[in-house]
Image (cartoon, helix red, strand yellow):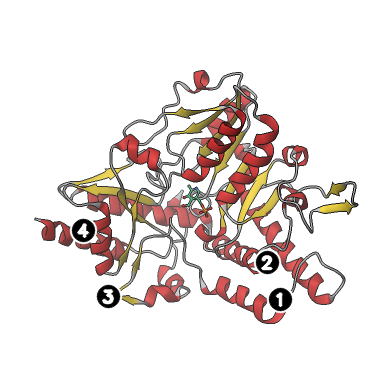
């Protein structure tokens, strides 16, 4: 596939990211932390700033030209999201504050509506806390239980037992598309088909997938697909819940207030349809418009080209890191995207993170909001480098030299 693609012009792309020319502790910054939050390119920052400078008002309010204009920009961004993930209708695209809020929305509406005492919610062993805690809260409230699809030492889900794990009591399967710790790309289409064969709906956490892979929710046949703007070269404070329309229509509202009602009397309120029903109050307008601009930016670069480029970076980094004595990579699945977690014998990941920081290399050290994954691999934390389309092989080499330097220091 990649051989037919024009390579990315990374030198030109880097000019769109002012932060990349910063100097940290006297060293050029090497930003290898896009899994925590992606950097925004100038066209996104400028689009948001134009909105705030020249176009700012509220949306879905009244007849003023400004309000109609803002509503058009805001809804155009929703259409960009729809197209980006291949949804059938903009009614299926609900704005949220991010992945976490989107999952909580589903748990508190769809979950409360369908899960009863004795029911089961099936999750994978590599979920982020965002796709564990809301279900645990719901399970506690309802007297339901969580079940877990296990994984092997490479960080791949063990799917042999899937048909036994899904029972007549399973009300939902929650599945991470790309692991934020291990980088594993899960075979979501296949898993969804197997869940659907048993009548179980699937929620996919796509926070780490949409920045790196072409996602088509209809091809995957996902029931819910969620992600955050800030991991997709967009701003914080905005995210997306995609839901199949018949499910969204059947779900009760979540927050109550303005913008989600059809009619209010003291006796009774009736609600608008999806997505407005789930969007009470003033939304993050500039952020939504910014996310639309980020999607334009990524679409112009081409998700396939991004995927091919990042795959090369990942392969280069893996090959170089594997050569370092005492360093162990966590997550060696056949299908991986964009992140490498590692531990080094005798050096705590936090110390490693701080030493790398001293060299201007920005990585994440910690449990990555995935403590069950840490427990599974018997480590307290890892250091994680994550790559984006603006990173270079030279930056990977800086990471590697900096790790070697840190190891020397600890000898
Ligand atoms: N799911 C995954 C896989 C993530 O990597 C993250 C963020 O790290 C989240 C969910 C939570 O995203 P947010 O904090 O934007 O809601």
* Residue 50 % position (x, y): 64, 78
Decide: few, some or many residues near mark 1? Use Cα within 10 Å; few <14, some 14-19, many ≥20.
some
* Residue marked by disc 3: 25
* Res 113 visible: yes
* Residue marked by disc 1: 56
Of the residues tagged 4 and 2, which is closer to the observer?
2
Quadrant containing the C terminus in the rendered view: bottom left
Circle 2/circle 1 CB separation < 8 Å = yes
Q: Is mark 3 within 8 Å of ligand 1?
A: no
User: Which residue occupies 87% across, 52% down?
Assistant: 262
Label at residue 285: 2
* Residue 142 % position (x, y): 62, 30
Of the residues tagged 1 and 4, which is closer to the observer?
1
Circle 2/circle 3 CB separation < 8 Å = no
In whole angstroms, how far apart are the C-alphas of marks 2 and 3?
36 Å
In whole angstroms, how far apart are the C-alphas of marks 2 and 1?
9 Å
Label at residue 403: 4
Label at residue 70: none
Vertical arrangement, residue 262 with respect to residue 243, above or below:
below
- Residue farthest to the bottom, as pictured: 54
From the viewer's side, name the closer residue of 58 and 40: 58
In whole angstroms, how far apart are the C-alphas of marks 1 and 4?
46 Å
Vertical arrangement, residue 319 with respect to residue 121, above or below:
below
* Residue 10 % position (x, y): 42, 68
Decide: few, some or many residues near mark 3? Use Cα within 10 Å; few <14, some 14-19, many ≥20.
few
Of the residues tagged 3 and 4, which is closer to the observer?
3
């Amino acid at each position: 596939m990649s051989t037919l693609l024009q390579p990315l012009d990374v030198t030109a792309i880097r000019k769109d990211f002012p932060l990349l020319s910063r100097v940290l502790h006297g060293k050029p910054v090497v930003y290898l932390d896009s899994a925590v939050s992606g950097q925004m390119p100038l066209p996104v920052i400028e689009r948001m700033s134009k909105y705030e400078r020249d176009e700012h008002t509220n949306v879905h309010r009244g007849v003023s030209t400004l309000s109609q204009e803002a509503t058009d920009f805001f809804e155009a961004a929703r259409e960009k999201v729809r197209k980006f993930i291949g949804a059938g209708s903009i009614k299926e695209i609900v704005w949220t504050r991010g992945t976490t809020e989107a999952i909580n929305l589903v748990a508190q509406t769809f979950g409360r509506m369908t899960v009863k005492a004795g029911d089961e919610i099936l999750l994978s062993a590599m979920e982020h806390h965002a796709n564990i805690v809301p279900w645990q809260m719901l399970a506690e409230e309802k007297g339901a239980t969580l079940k877990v699809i296990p994984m092997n030492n490479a960080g791949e889900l063990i799917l042999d037992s899937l048909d036994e794990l899904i029972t007549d009591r399973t009300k939902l399967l929650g599945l991470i598309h790309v692991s934020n710790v291990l980088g594993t790309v899960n075979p979501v289409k296949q898993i969804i088909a197997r869940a659907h064969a048993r009548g179980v709906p699937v929620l996919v956490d796509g926070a780490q997938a949409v920045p790196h892979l072409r996602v088509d929710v209809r091809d995957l046949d996902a029931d819910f697909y969620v992600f955050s703007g800030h991991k997709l070269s967009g701003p914080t404070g905005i995210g997306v819940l995609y839901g199949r329309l018949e499910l969204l229509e059947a779900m009760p509202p979540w927050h109550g207030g303005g913008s989600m009602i059809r009619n209010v009397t003291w006796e009774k309120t009736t609600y608008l349809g999806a997505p407005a029903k789930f969007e009470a109050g003033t939304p993050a307008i500039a952020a939504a418009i910014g996310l639309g601009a980020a999607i334009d930016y990524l679409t112009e670069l081409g998700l396939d080209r991004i995927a091919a480029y990042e795959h090369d970076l990942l392969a280069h980094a893996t090959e170089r890191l594997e050569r370092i004595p005492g360093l162990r990579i966590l997550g060696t699945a056949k299908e991986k995207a964009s992140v490498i977690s590692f531990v080094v014998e005798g050096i705590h990941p936090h110390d490693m993170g701080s030493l790398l920081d001293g060299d201007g290399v920005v990585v994440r050290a910690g449990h990555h909001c995935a403590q069950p994954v840490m427990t599974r691999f018997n480590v307290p934390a890892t250091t994680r480098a994550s790559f984006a389309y603006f990173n270079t092989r030279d930056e990977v080499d800086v990471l590697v030299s900096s790790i070697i330097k840190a190891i020397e220091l600890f000898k």
